[in-house]
Amino acid sequence: MPHLSPLNWLITPLTFWILLLTFMSILWWSQTSHFPPLYSSFTLPRTPQWNW
């Protein structure tokens, strides 16, 4: 088992929190903005104005 450097102990939680905050901000943005959510293009449209 390789020895973990102190840098690894710092980077791993940092990456986790950055990913988490990015995900939460995308969710918050999609709920508060007047634009359609970011994932609307990947899911089936649910509102009438999005039916083609």
Image: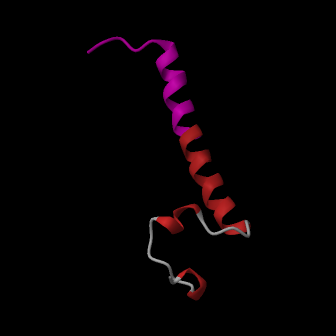
15 relative to 34, above or below? above
Q: Is residue 39 above or below residue 21?
A: below
Residue at the location (51% across, 15% down)? 7
**Quadrant in which the N terminus appears:** top left
Q: Is residue 2 rendered to the left or right of residue 18?
A: left
In the image, residue 50 lies in the stretch drawn in magenta: no
The question of residue 6 being in magenta is answered with: yes
Residue segment shown in magenta: 1-17
Relative to 34, residue 18 above or below: above
Secondary structure character of the magenta stretch overall: helix
* Left or right relative to 32: residue 9: left
Residue 25, position as x, y percentages in the image: 65, 53
Residue drawn at 62 percent across, 46 percent down: 21
For the point 56% across and 80% down, the residue is 50
Left or right: residue 20 versus residue 44 is right
Please name whichever residue, 37 or 52, is drawn nearer the observer in this view of the structure. 52
Residue 33 in picture, x, y percent from top left: 73, 66
State the residue lying farthest toward the front: 52
The colour scheme used to paint the residues is: secondary structure
Q: Position of residue 51 (x, y in %)?
A: 51, 84
Residue in the image at 68% along x and 60% along y: 29
